[in-house]
Image (cartoon, rainbow, N blue to C red):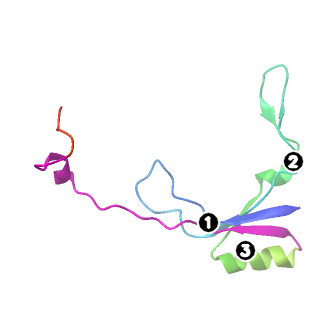
């Protein structure tokens, strides 16, 4: 049973950085999803796919995987490069594009 350890990204619907802390261990799919022929619903008989275990640090997640003899891969998170901008930049003189309503 293979597991993936990663740090979750922030929710795209929120501007804050809450929920980015911690690490998650989740199991990889062992069987593909199937489509139910009558209604077209997607189903899976793989119950391990529903398990997500949260840890405070990457080391705790790795120790858990080793202790339970799980094959794991660690997916490092990418660093953010926010570009500072102000609202006044939308109206500054010499802007590349003209401001319109």
Q: Which residues are magenta?
A: 69-95
Q: Give the number of the mark in front: 1 or 2.
A: 1
Q: Is residue 88 left or right of residue 81?
A: left
Counting other residues with Cα less than 10 Å from the Cα at mark 1, is it few (<14), some (14-19), or many (20 or more)? many
Vertical placement of residue 36 versus 89, above or below = above
Question: Label 2 crowding class (10 Å Cα cut-off): few <14, some 14-19, many 20+?
Answer: few
Can residue 90 be found in the magenta stretch? Answer: yes
Q: Tell me the residue at 84%/27% (across/down).
A: 36
Residue 61 is marked as 3
Query: Which secondary structure lies at badge 1?
Result: loop
Q: Position of residue 62 (x, y in %)?
A: 75, 76
Q: Is the residue 74 above or below the residue 59 in the image?
A: above
Mark 1 touching mark 2, by CB under 8 A? no
Which of pointers 3 and 2 lies earlier in the amino acid sequence? 2
State the residue position of label 2.
46
Give the vertical position of 29 relative to 19 (above or below).
above
Mark sitting on residue 7 = 1
- Marks 1 and 3 sit apart, C-alpha to C-alpha, by 11 Å
Q: CA distance from mark 1 to mark 2?
A: 23 Å
> Observer-nearest residue: 16 or 100?
100
Q: Is residue 79 above or below residue 47?
A: below
Q: Position of residue 53 (x, y in %)?
A: 72, 64
Give how far across and how far down residue 73 sits, in percent: 76, 67
Q: Identify the main secondary structure in magenta.
A: loop
CB under 8 Å between discs 3 and 2: no
First in residue order: circle 1 vs circle 3: 1
Which comes sooner in the sequence, label 1 or label 2? 1
Q: Tell me what residue is drawn at x 51 percent, y 53 percent.
A: 11
At label 3, counting other C-alpha atoms closer than 10 Å, the crowd grade (few under 14, some 14-19, many 20 or more) is many
98 to the left or right of 2: left
Q: How many marks?
A: 3
Left or right of 14, for residue 87 = left
């Amino acid at each position: 049973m293979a597991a993936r350890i990663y740090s979750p990204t922030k929710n795209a619907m929120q501007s804050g950085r809450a929920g980015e802390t911690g690490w998650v261990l989740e199991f990889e799919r062992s069987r593909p999803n199937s489509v139910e022929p009558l209604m077209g619903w997607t189903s899976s008989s793989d119950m391990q796919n529903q398990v997500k275990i949260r840890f405070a640090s990457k080391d705790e997640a790795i120790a858990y995987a080793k202790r339970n003899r799980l094959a794991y891969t660690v997916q490092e998170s990418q660093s953010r490069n926010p570009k500072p901008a102000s609202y006044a930049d939308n109206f500054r003189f010499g802007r590349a594009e003209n401001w319109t309503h």
